[in-house]
Image (tube, helix red, strand yellow):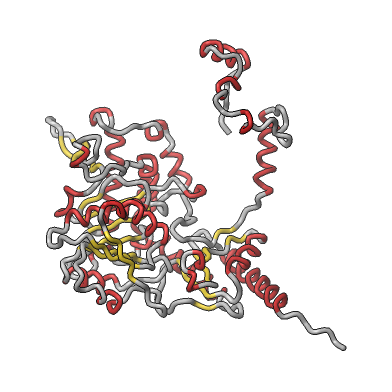
């Protein structure tokens, strides 16, 4: 809770300087019928100690739910040092590094972030982040359409097994720019995209194919095969990837014979708390041949006249720096504070630490789904390998079971029926390295209990005559 030093005399002095009598006068443009007369449940005044007790009491009333939801935002452990460093004044208040001589620390952080992301993705160049993974995908599609010189097509294939929020954001951003987004259905048995499904679009002329690894269902795609299929048809490949998964899986730059052309995703798993949905940061990487169409800023390392190393902004294809009509993007941004946290997080974990996190996530999800599938009526929805998320078919409506689990402080997963009605009732569950054996056992026990309760409610015992 912040310390607010203003006394009544301070407030009176500020109001006098502004030329109003009361704080309420500052809001006189709000119609009176929209204002609340009073807050009956809020005490008129409390001391710092009393308000601290009140807020703690209110927060405890919410309970401490255990999270088994993934679906694009993941409950990972964040070392205490990450935000202790990121919120230091030098980083926390740093502005856009337009003046390199005054921004060496900020520029070096951006440079280190870019270097780490290219190492993770196996590609040549990275920018200094975007808003989130969904808008990063939209920027990647716009970039692919600009870069593909072998096709005048503005058609992009997107798997239906891609995150529904990503697909919605993509259509919102590129739909008004003459780009056709065509969804490819997923295999009902494996939950993945097959060559047979892609072949229906083989002769239509495609600017790009999007491959997400793993996909929204947690299923691993045949990335090598799909990449080669696209390149054989002169289409670019955009990989949508989870940065933690890349510690174990082949990076996009190594998919197929020549690798994906562009990779993007959300950096939230790298030191960013769930925080009720954000803020997060997106990343975008590409091959060097496409570098000049990469939106955002790129920080570079160089040497001054004395031979000392230094950092500066190199390519800056944003509308602030060049003519709007020539800009590669008018909405991308540098999420500097989040990038700082991600950079510190990756530096602390290192390659070995990130691989251990990924391995622990996969092991926990396997343990979780094995336990849940012992509950009658619960079974895997798809039969392919997964990474740290899995889709399960349920014996009762997912919304009902998730609501009952939430009453026991268990956030049981994402209701797949919300985005994929044909899969209902089904749930997408996730277990990161944060989930303990006790957490997993408690989830399985409570799910068995709520399923049994639902079954009994549907099948009441006939009274004896």
Residue 226 sits in which quadrant?
bottom left
- Up the image or down, 432 lies above or below 29; here it is below
Q: Is residue 60 left or right of residue 114?
A: right
Q: Name the residue at 17% across, 53% down.
A: 290
Quadrant placement of the N terminus: top right
Which residue is at the front of the view, 204 or 411? 204
Residue 93 x/y as whole percent: 39, 31
Q: Is residue 244 left or right of residue 438?
A: left
Residue 167 x/y as whole percent: 37, 59
Residue 366 x/y as whole percent: 48, 72
Quadrant placement of the C terminus: bottom right
Q: Is residue 338 left or right of residue 182?
A: right
Which residue is at the front of the view, 424 or 334? 424
Q: Is residue 390 left or right of residue 195?
A: right
Q: Name the residue at 57% across, 23% down.
A: 28
Which residue is at the front of the view, 421 or 247? 421
Residue 371 seen from this side: no
- Up the image or down, 381 lies above or below 209; here it is below
Residue most toward the right? 465
Which residue is at the front of the view, 178 or 123? 178
- Up the image or down, 411 lies above or below 56; here it is below
Residue 162 x/y as whole percent: 37, 64
Residue 456 seen from this side: yes
């Amino acid at each position: 809770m912040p310390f607010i030093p203003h006394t009544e005399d301070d407030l009176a002095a500020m109001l006098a300087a502004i030329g109003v009598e009361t704080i309420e006068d500052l809001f006189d443009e709000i119609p009176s019928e929209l204002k609340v007369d009073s807050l009956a449940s809020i005490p008129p005044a409390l001391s710092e100690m009393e308000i601290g007790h009140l807020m703690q009491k209110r927060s405890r009333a919410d309970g401490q739910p255990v999270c088994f939801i993934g679906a694009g935002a993941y409950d990972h452990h964040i070392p205490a040092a990450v935000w202790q460093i990121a919120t230091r004044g030098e980083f926390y208040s740093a502005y856009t590094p337009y003046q390199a001589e005054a921004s060496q620390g900020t520029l070096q952080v951006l440079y280190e972030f870019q270097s780490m992301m290219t190492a993770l993705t196996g590609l040549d160049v990275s920018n200094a982040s975007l808003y989130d993974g969904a808008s990063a995908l939209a920027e990647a599609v716009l970039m692919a359409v600009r870069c593909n010189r072998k096709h005048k097509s503005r058609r992009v294939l997107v798997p239906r097994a891609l995150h529904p929020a990503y697909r919605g954001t993509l259509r919102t951003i590129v739909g008004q720019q003459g780009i056709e987004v065509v969804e490819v259905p997923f295999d009902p048995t494996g939950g993945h995209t097959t060559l047979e499904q892609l072949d229906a679009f083989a002769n239509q002329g495609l600017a790009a194919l999007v491959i997400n690894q793993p996909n929204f269902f947690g299923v691993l795609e045949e990335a090598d095969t799909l990449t080669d299929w696209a390149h054989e048809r002169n289409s670019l490949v955009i990989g949508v990837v989870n940065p933690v998964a890349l510690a174990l899986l082949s990076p996009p730059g190594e998919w197929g014979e020549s690798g994906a052309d562009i990779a993007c995703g959300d950096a939230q798993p790298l030191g960013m708390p769930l925080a009720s949905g954000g803020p997060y940061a997106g990343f975008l990487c590409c091959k060097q041949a496409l570098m000049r169409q990469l939106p955002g800023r790129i920080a570079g390392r160089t040497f001054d006249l004395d031979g000392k190393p230094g950092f500066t902004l190199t390519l800056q294809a944003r509308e602030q720096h060049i003519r709007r009509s020539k800009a590669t993007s008018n909405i991308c941004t540098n999420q500097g504070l989040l990038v700082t946290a991600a950079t510190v997080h990756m530096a602390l974990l290192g390659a070995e630490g990130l691989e251990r996190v990924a391995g622990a996530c996969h092991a926990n999800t396997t343990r979780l789904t094995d336990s849940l599938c012992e509950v009658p009526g619960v079974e895997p929805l798809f039969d392919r390998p997964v990474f740290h998320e899995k889709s399960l078919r349920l014996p009762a409506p997912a919304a009902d079971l998730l609501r009952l689990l939430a009453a026991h402080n268990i956030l049981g997963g994402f209701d797949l029926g919300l985005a994929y009605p044909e899969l209902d009732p089904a749930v997408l569950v996730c277990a990161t390295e944060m989930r303990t054996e006790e957490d997993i056992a408690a989830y399985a026990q409570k799910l068995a209990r709520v399923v049994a309760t639902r079954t009994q409610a549907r099948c009441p015992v006939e009274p004896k005559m």
